[in-house]
Image (tube, helix red, strand yellow):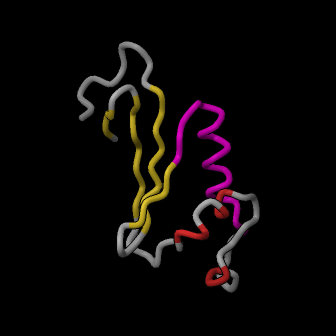
Amino acid sequence: MRRQGDRILAEVADNGPGIPAQEREKVFQRLYRLDSSRTTPGSGLGLSLVRAIADLHGATIALEDRRPGLAVIVGFPRAEGTGPGLK
């Protein structure tokens, strides 16, 4: 976690195949799955749930290509008097 202006950013990243740029907004739709992942277990709910929780808390969510991999960055509004020790 790190502070950026008036937001606290939480980031989760991997080194997998990533998500093509043209698919990134679609992965927030409930039950959406990339063609390449349709044969693997899962329901396509992960990022739609992350977006719903972020929205409830006034947070933003962004996807970044890490070549290889993907980063999901959630930016929460910083409450007054919080965040000591965060960079």
- The image position of residue 7, as x and y in percent, is 40, 31
Q: Is residue 55 magenta?
A: yes
Query: Which segment did they paint magenta?
Result: 43-61
Residue found at x 44% / y 49%: 73
Judge whether 32 appears above or below 81 on screen: below
Residue found at x 39% / y 33%: 8
- Outermost residue to the top: 81
Question: Which quadrant of the structure image shows residue 83?
Answer: top left
- The image position of residue 28, as x and y in percent, is 66, 57
Q: Is residue 27 left or right of residue 63?
A: right
Q: Is residue 85 left or right of residue 22?
A: left
- Outermost residue to the front: 22
Residue found at x 36% / y 13%: 81
Residue found at x 27% / y 32%: 86
Residue in the foreground of this view, choosing between 56 and 43: 56
- The image position of residue 14, as x and y in percent, is 40, 67
